[in-house]
Image (cartoon, rainbow, N blue to C red):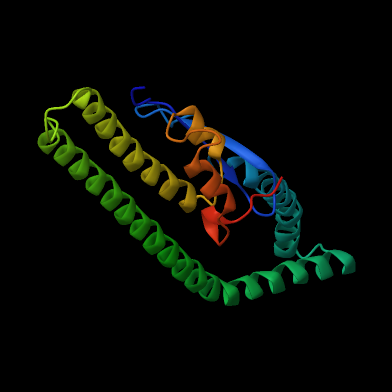
């Protein structure tokens, strides 16, 4: 079975439910929502927008009344609260900026390291596949069915390379989806490899998935 352009994987959000994201190389990301942070942050963004609009509509009459000295006692108290909150936000601005900058730097470093490791896996797989296609071209000795065995060995080695790369990508996303591997013919249901993977336990991919 040839390589498919569409890549579908199941990601386990812990704690959470299984969510599926699909992506096809070359597909436009301009109006894409699936797989982004929009489904998670849109409620908070909407609340912040509405709260900010209400605060601005409340503060503007107070600011205008302060200039003409026409505020009542309660309005003066509310204006003082706005002014005090402004000073507090000024104090927190530097601290929050530092924390966000440090956090973004750490996240980018981790993402870049994962990108390098994923590239190393792909490069090693391509090099190994090239060596298999170049050196494994004829049976080691003439025998009946040797060509068929050679072809089977070549296909099996390529399958194991793809299986290892798929398992590494699943481990990056903390996924344990054997059905996806079986559908791509990288794993045989009920085979020795499948049974061995089901028995393995440990962090990441080898951990038991939540139902």
**Percent position (x, y) of residue 102?**
45, 71
Work out which quarter of the rendered image holds the C terminus and state it.
top right
Residue occupying image coordinates x 81% and y 66%: 78
Work out which quarter of the rendered image holds the N terminus and state it.
top left
Q: Which quadrant of the figure has residue 3? A: top left
Q: Toward the viewer: 165 or 80?
A: 165
- Locate residue 160 relative to residue 63 in the image: left or right: left
Asked if residue 63 can be seen in this view, the reply is yes
Q: Which quadrant of the figure has residue 109? A: bottom left
- Locate residue 163 relative to residue 44 in the image: left or right: left
Q: Toward the viewer: 128 or 45?
A: 128
**Percent position (x, y) of residue 128?**
20, 44
**Percent position (x, y) of residue 187?**
46, 36
Q: Is residue 210 above or below residue 92?
A: above
Q: Is residue 169 above or below residue 156?
A: below
Residue occupying image coordinates x 24% and y 23%: 148
Q: Toward the viewer: 10 or 202?
A: 202
Q: Toward the viewer: 26 or 143?
A: 143
- Locate residue 124 relative to residue 137 in the image: left or right: right
Asked if residue 33 can be seen in this view, the reply is no
Q: Which quadrant of the figure has residue 161? A: top left
Q: Is residue 86 above or below residue 182?
A: below
Among all residues in the image, which is located at the extreme front? 143
């Amino acid at each position: 079975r040839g390589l498919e352009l569409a890549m579908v994987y199941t990601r386990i959000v812990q704690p959470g439910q299984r969510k599926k994201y699909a992506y096809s190389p070359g597909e436009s990301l301009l109006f894409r929502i699936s797989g982004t942070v929009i489904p998670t942050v849109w409620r908070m963004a909407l609340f912040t927008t509405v709260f900010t609009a209400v605060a601005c509509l409340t503060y503007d009459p107070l600011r205008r009344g302060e200039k003409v000295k026409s505020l009542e006692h309660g309005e003066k108290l509310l204006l003082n609260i706005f002014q005090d909150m402004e000073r507090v936000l000024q104090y927190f601005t530097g601290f929050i900026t530092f924390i966000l900058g440090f956090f973004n730097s750490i996240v980018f470093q981790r993402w870049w390291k994962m990108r390098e490791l994923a590239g190393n896996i792909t490069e090693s797989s391509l090099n190994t596949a090239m060596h298999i296609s170049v050196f494994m071209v004829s049976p080691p000795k003439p025998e009946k069915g040797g060509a068929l065995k050679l072809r089977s060995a070549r296909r099996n080695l390529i399958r194991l390379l793809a299986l290892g790369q798929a398992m590494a990508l699943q481990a990056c996303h903390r996924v344990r989806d054997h059905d996806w591997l079986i559908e791509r013919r990288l794993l045989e249901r009920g085979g020795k490899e499948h049974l061995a993977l089901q028995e393995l336990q440990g962090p990441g991919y080898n951990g038991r998935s939540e139902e």
